[in-house]
Image: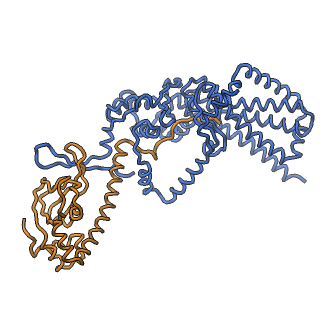
Amino acid sequence: MSSAAQSVPEFLHKVAFLQDLDDQTLSILAARLVSRTIKGGEVIFRELDDSDVLYIVEQGRVVVSKHVRGDVDIVLTRFNPGDFFGEMGLFDAAPRSATAHAESDTVLWQLSRHAFEQILSDYPAIAARICYRLVMVFIQRLRATNEQAREAIRWGLEATGYSPEETPATFGRKST
Amino acid sequence: MAEPAKLELLTRRPGEPGFEIHEVQSQQAYLGFRPGRPPETEWELTPQPRGLDGSRNYILKSHKRDNYLLLSPQEYFLWEHFDGHHSLNEISRALHFKFGSFDFEIIRQFLGKLYLAGLLNELQTTGLRRSVARRHERWWKGPLAAISKYWSRITIRVSDADHYCAALYDRGGFLLFRWSFLVLYGALLIGAIIAVSRLWPHMAEIAGRVATRPLLSTAIMLATIVFVAMLHVLVHALACKAYGRKVREMGFFLLQGLLPTFYADVTDIFLSSRRVRVMVDLSGPMVEVVCGSIAFIGAYCAEAGFAQSLLFGAGLVLWESALLNLYPFNFLELDGYNVLADLLAMPTLRQRALALVRRLPHRLRSGKMPDRAEWIQLGYLALCLVSVLAYLIVHLDAVGVKLFAWRSAP
């Protein structure tokens, strides 16, 4: 692990929740980021682990999954360079809701809850802009989750042959 | 058609690093699906008489939803194999061995029927599914479907009809089905035939008196028809009770989406014999015959006048109504059609015949001639067409003659 250097702000420009911020602001944030390199196939965090860090993907690819049964998880989403995940850990102390794996060799930058709280107290204006952008991303992700739930249900319906709108009527005799 | 839904599963091997991701399409899972019947307490299965092609249908009743399914021999085979242990892949192979080539779609349709009847574990997502489907529809299909849906729902129903019918049957309704009453109906019929033969020479005079008060005559005739139609349906229901079966509901609806009529849902008689079904079918038109006979006898006993003419007219209308009801070849599922369908052991004769017409050109092009059952269905359709055309020609001709007479009048 190493602290963020001068090169970091350039990369941070691509991150969705930081796109409004100028270089000076980004450098304040960058000073609080910590890098982490993960090999492909390794676990970044597991479901139910303690949660207090947000991750930003600089390189590689991350797959997030949720345990279904035994050794089987369902893939929820993937994150590519410029994406971030684990943001719930900045706001609440609940355990991780899903597991994150590196799908390939990956470089991540971590922002801890402690560091985020420092920004909140020392730079409220910056924190407000970051929070606003985060809310926008949460909304997008919530919409994506709804779509994912719909697809999962469609999968279930198709897998069990359930198709009510194509179903012929039941049999009956109405004597008239 | 939408792409099949996909899920991605991430799997790990115990004790080994890394993971694998597999994409599973809904269709793959469908082949591995193992549908299971509910416990036997939740349904009742009754074999039907063999059809002309030697095949046997079955009626499956869902006690949970109180509805009925007509199972073809293939569907019965599927039902027998839906034991929760066999996958659809295995079942479809077994079906192929038993019946030869088949359309895989029949399995999906049968599953749909079972879900609808509550005879498989149901997923409570119908609304969601519909909203998904709606996104791909054309803008005008929605309102059109809504109009069609609400039109077809113009229905008044008494869902607790069985309770009322049972009470009515116990409080005297049973008498209608006693031998003594059947003898009485016969006597009335003979009396009516004699009355008609005596009154027939005075037909012009009798008809002329009805025409003197057209509005009153029409109103009384309509009221008579409606009242007797209600009695007709009630007697169907009582006949169903006479054979110990349930009347699911009674009410008013648009027969085949067109013809406003009263009805009694007597589907439960499919759990009885064919003879019982025919008896229940015939009991309704007997009401028109008996009421018409009483009207004719009344007309014969009455003094010459407006009342006599009305009674005679009512008798004619009711007998004609009985005849129309018993005539099976008119595209409508009236009592005569039901008798025919029961005698042929083809409870869905009309639907099958219409479905056959749609696929007949393709069948003939592929050199496959209709089998015996299909020839019967085609014969039914041909007779329906001829009957309806003859009816139209006769009536249009009558209208044409009148128009011609009116135009050429001085």
Chain identity for the colour orange used in the image:
A
- In this rendering, the answer to whether B130 lies above or below A23 is above
Q: Is residue A41 left or right of residue B401?
A: left
- In this rendering, the answer to whether B341 lies above or below B404 is above
Residue at the spot x=72%, y=33% of the render? B322
Q: Is residue B41 left or right of residue B8?
A: right
Chain identity for the colour blue used in the image:
B
**x, y percentage for residue B96?**
36, 31
Q: Describe the colour scheme in one phrase.
A: by chain
Counting labels gives 0
- In this rendering, the answer to whether B42 lies above or below A141 is above
- Toward the right, the furthest residue is B304
Nearer to me, A156 or B43: B43
Q: Is residue A23 left or right of residue B62?
A: left
Nearer to me, A74 or B325: A74
Q: Quadrant of residue B393?
A: top right
**x, y percentage for residue A28?**
15, 76
Residue at the spot x=87%, y=42% of the render? B210
Residue at the spot x=75%, y=41% of the render? B394
* Residue A102 appears in the figure: no
Q: Quadrant of residue B310?
A: top right
Quarter of the image with the C terminus of chain B in it: bottom right
Nearer to me, B317 or B65: B65
**x, y percentage for residue B135?**
43, 57
* Residue B157 appears in the figure: yes
- Toward the left, the furthest residue is A2
